[in-house]
Amino acid sequence: MARDEELKERWETLSQKLSEQFGDGEVLDLDAIIYLIGVQELGQLHREFKKDEKLDLMHIAICRLLEPYGYYEFEYFDEEGWPHYQTKGELPHLKAGEQSVLMKEAVVNYFVTAAYIA
């Protein structure tokens, strides 16, 4: 199977599984899934987040997702338990569609590594 087809298939499986578990009947898009990863990485699962905290959660997720690609490196947890990352390499200049593919690949790899999907 071609790499793009495999990614598409895994993405569909992951999106469906997460939507059933967290979507309340809605299909979760990439941003919603990135947000869920941020909540997971923070580890404060049962609390409400303010708007600015939601953006911070997405930033945490993006850093965590792109860490295996060498763009970020985990530094430390602050006194409130929020993880902090440092930039390791400059992000490539990608078109919107290419960014989406990179992020979907990183999300799929995150959940494969966590044994949530195969």
Image (spheres, rainbow, N blue to C red):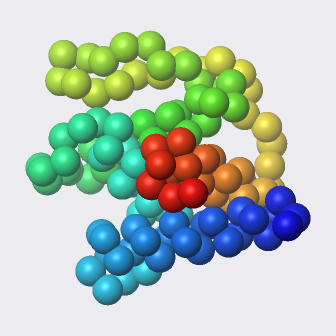
Residue 108: quarter of image = bottom right
Residue 21: quarter of image = bottom left
Closer to us: 46 or 87: 46
Relative vertical location of residue 71 with respect to residue 22 in this rendering, above or below: above
Q: Residue at x 57, y 57 (%)?
A: 118
Quarter placement of the N terminus: bottom right
Relative vertical location of residue 98 with respect to residue 19 in this rendering, above or below: above
Q: Position of residue 44 (x, y in %)?
A: 19, 41
Q: Residue at x 59, y 74 (%)?
A: 12
**Which residue reaches farthest right?**
2
Residue 103 seen in render: no
Q: Position of residue 74 (x, y in %)?
A: 48, 19
Closer to us: 57 or 51: 57
Q: Is residue 42 left or right of residue 95?
A: left
**Which residue reaches farthest bottom?**
25
Q: Is residue 72 left or right of residue 64?
A: right
Q: Position of residue 70 (x, y in %)?
A: 68, 25
Q: Residue at x 47, y 49 (%)?
A: 115
Q: Is residue 37 left or right of residue 6?
A: left
Q: Residue at x 18, y 24 (%)?
A: 80
Q: Position of residue 10 (x, y in %)?
A: 63, 65
**Which residue reaches farthest left?**
47
Relative vertical location of residue 88 with respect to residue 82 in this rendering, above or below: above
Q: Is residue 5 left or right of residue 113?
A: right
Disc tally is 0
Residue 113 seen in render: yes
Relative vertical location of residue 31 with respect to residue 53 in this rendering, above or below: below
Closer to us: 79 or 105: 105
